[in-house]
Image (cartoon, rainbow, N blue to C red):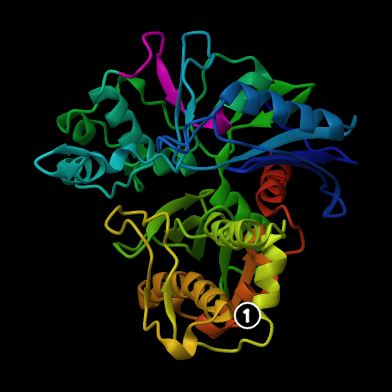
C-alpha cells in the first residue's frame, strides 16, 4: 500500500455510500466544503431472500452501480475516492478477487436459528468467544454458512461489500479491511485492532477466510488516476459527515434501521453499546435497533392495504400517516414497534399495551408507533455510562427516516429532551466518505 496521496488546488473528492436500500455518490469540493453533485440509485435484496431471512444482495450489481454513479459525477480534478459501506455483512471472493457468493447483509437472520443445546448460532458463538455477537454479524453469518456446508468451494476470503467495491474499482484481487468494518464482523480486539483469531478458532470458526486489518487511511489503488481509499463503516462515515461538534452532540440516524451514536476519545468498557473504531481519533458508542424506516414503511403499507381491500382505493400510505397524526399530541397507547425483532435476537416481535376504548383510534396507533421508535433509541442512550453522556445537549439528526418524518422528529425531541437539528448534507454517509478522502489528502 505504497500509493501516495497529494494535495493540489481545485481538488475534489467523490464519496460513495453503499446503503441497504440505496447507493449514493457525492462530488465534494474540498476547497469550499460544498457538495457540488449527487447521484443515487436503488439497492435491493435478491428475490426470495427477504422471505427466507437471509437478506442477501448481488455484489457485482452493487459494484457496477456504484461505479456508474461515480462516473456520472467525475471531473478532472477528482483526486480521491472514499467509500462508505453498510456494516456487519460479508461476501466471499475467489483467488482473483471476484465474488463467488451473494452479499449477506446485516439483516441476515440465520444467526438466530437454533444451533446446539437450544442456543442460536449467535448466542453459542458469543458464549464460546466471550464476545458480543448478533445475527447479521459477519462472524456469525460465516459460522452459520460453515456449519451448514454453504461456503463456496472457490472462496478464499470474506470481505465487506465496501471492500469489494474498492477491489473492483482498482482491479485488485484482495484488500485489507478497515478496522471500522472489521470490528463490525464480531470477534475483534478494539485495542489491538485485530481479529481474536485464537478465540474464534477455539469456538470452532474456520479463521482462514478472515481478511487482514488495514492501517488508517489505507490507499487500495487508483481509479481513473484518483486514489481509492479503503472502505469505512457507514456509521462512522455518517457521523463524520453530520456532526461538527462531537463533544456536545449526539447523532441519531434513522435509515432502514436506527442508531444513536456518541463519540468518546477513550475506550470505556460497557455492555450498553456497540463500540466502534472512529478513524483513529477515538470510538463511537452505538445503540442500534432494527426498528427504523423499514418498520415505518410496513405501517404505511398496512394502511394502504386497508384502503385497497376495504374500499378499492389506492392510497399513499405515508400521506395517510401524516393525516392521521394531525392534531394528535399524546396517547396512553404504548406501542413497541419492533416488528423485525431486536439486534440480540431476544425479542422477536412488537406489541401493544394499554389498548382500550379511549385510545382505539388510528391516530393513537400511529402516534404510539412513532413514540415507540423514539423511546427505543432514547432508552439505548440512557443505558450508556454517564461519562459518555456528559455534556451532550443536542441531537444532530440524519437519515431519510427522520428527514421525511416530522412526527418522528417531534417524538425524538420529546423523548431525549434535546433540540434536534439536521446536518447540512442529506447524504451524510457519502458526504462523510468524501470528507474522509479529502482529510487523507490534507494529511498526506
Disc 1 is placed on an element classified as helix
Q: Is residue 373 above or below residue 63?
A: below
Q: Which residues are magenta?
A: 150-163
Q: Is residue 78 above or below residue 190?
A: above
Q: Is residue 399 above or below residue 62?
A: below
- Residue at 62%, 80% in the rendered image: 410
- Residue at 48%, 82% in the rendered image: 360
- State the quadrant of the C terminus: top right
**Closer to us: 202 or 46:** 46
Q: Position of residue 100 (x, y in %)?
A: 48, 15
Q: Position of residue 276 (x, y in %)?
A: 44, 52
- State the quadrant of the N terminus: top right
Instruction: Based on the picture, tell me whether residue 385 belongs to the magenta stretch.
Output: no
**Is residue 22 at least partly visible in the picture?**
yes
**Closer to us: 54 or 230:** 54
Q: How many tags in the picture?
A: 1
Residue 279 appears left or right of 344: right
- Residue at 62%, 54% in the rendered image: 238
Q: Is residue 418 above or below residue 254?
A: below
Residue 296 appears left or right of 22: left
Mark 1, residue position = 410
Q: Position of residue 54 (x, y in %)?
A: 41, 34
**Closer to us: 238 or 334:** 334
Amino acid at each position: 500500500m505504497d500509493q501516495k496521496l497529494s494535495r493540489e488546488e481545485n481538488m475534489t473528492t467523490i464519496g460513495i455510500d453503499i446503503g441497504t436500500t440505496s447507493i449514493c455518490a457525492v462530488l465534494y469540493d474540498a476547497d469550499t466544503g460544498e457538495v457540488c453533485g449527487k447521484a443515487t440509485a436503488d439497492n435491493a435484496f435478491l428475490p426470495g431472500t427477504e422471505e427466507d431471512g437471509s437478506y442477501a444482495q448481488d455484489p457485482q450489481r452493487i459494484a457496477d452501480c456504484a461505479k456508474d454513479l461515480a462516473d456520472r459525477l467525475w471531473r478532472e480534478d477528482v483526486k480521491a475516492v472514499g467509500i462508505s459501506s453498510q456494516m456487519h455483512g460479508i461476501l466471499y471472493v475467489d483467488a482473483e478477487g471476484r465474488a463467488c457468493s451473494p452479499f449477506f447483509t446485516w439483516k441476515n437472520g440465520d444467526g438466530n436459528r437454533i444451533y446446539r443445546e437450544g442456543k442460536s448460532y449467535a448466542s453459542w458463538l458469543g458464549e464460546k468467544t466471550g464476545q458480543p455477537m448478533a445475527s447479521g454479524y459477519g462472524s456469525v453469518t460465516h459460522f452459520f454458512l460453515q456449519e451448514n456446508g454453504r461456503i463456496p468451494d472457490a472462496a478464499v476470503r470474506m470481505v465487506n461489500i465496501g471492500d469489494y467495491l474498492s477491489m473492483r474499482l482498482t482491479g485488485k484481487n484482495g484488500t485489507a479491511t478497515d478496522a471500522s468494518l472489521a470490528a463490525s464482523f464480531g470477534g475483534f480486539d478494539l485495542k489491538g485492532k485485530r481479529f481474536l483469531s485464537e478465540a474464534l478458532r477455539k469456538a470452532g470458526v474456520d479463521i482462514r477466510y478472515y481478511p487482514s486489518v488495514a492501517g488508517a487511511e489505507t490507499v487500495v489503488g487508483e481509479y481513473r488516476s484518483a486514489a481509492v481509499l479503503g472502505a469505512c463503516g457507514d456509521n462512522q462515515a455518517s457521523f463524520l459527515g453530520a456532526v461538527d461538534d462531537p463533544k456536545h452532540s449526539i447523532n441519531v440516524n434513522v435509515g432502514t434501521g436506527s442508531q444513536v451514536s456518541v463519540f468518546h476519545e477513550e475506550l470505556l468498557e460497557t455492555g450498553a453499546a456497540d463500540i466502534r473504531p472512529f478513524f483513529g481519533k477515538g470510538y463511537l458508542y452505538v445503540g442500534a435497533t432494527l426498528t427504523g424506516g423499514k418498520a415505518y414503511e410496513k405501517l404505511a403499507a398496512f394502511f394502504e392495504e386497508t384502503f385497497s381491500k376495504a374500499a378499492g382505493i389506492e392510497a399513499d400510505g405515508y400521506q395517510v400517516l401524516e393525516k392521521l397524526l394531525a392534531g394528535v399530541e399524546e396517547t396512553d397507547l404504548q406501542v413497541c414497534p419492533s416488528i423485525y425483532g431486536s439486534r440480540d435476537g431476544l425479542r422477536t416481535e412488537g406489541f401493544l399495551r394499554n389498548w382500550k376504548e379511549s385510545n382505539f383510534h388510528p391516530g393513537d396507533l400511529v402516534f404510539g408507533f412513532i413514540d415507540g421508535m423514539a423511546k427505543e433509541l432514547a432508552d439505548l442512550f440512557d443505558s450508556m455510562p454517564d461519562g459518555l453522556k456528559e455534556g451532550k445537549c443536542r441531537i444532530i439528526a440524519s437519515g431519510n427516516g427522520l428527514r421525511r418524518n416530522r412526527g418522528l422528529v417531534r417524538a425524538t425531541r420529546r423523548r431525549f429532551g434535546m433540540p434536534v437539528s439536521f446536518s447540512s448534507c442529506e447524504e451524510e454517509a457519502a458526504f462523510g466518505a468524501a470528507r474522509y478522502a479529502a482529510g487523507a489528502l490534507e494529511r498526506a
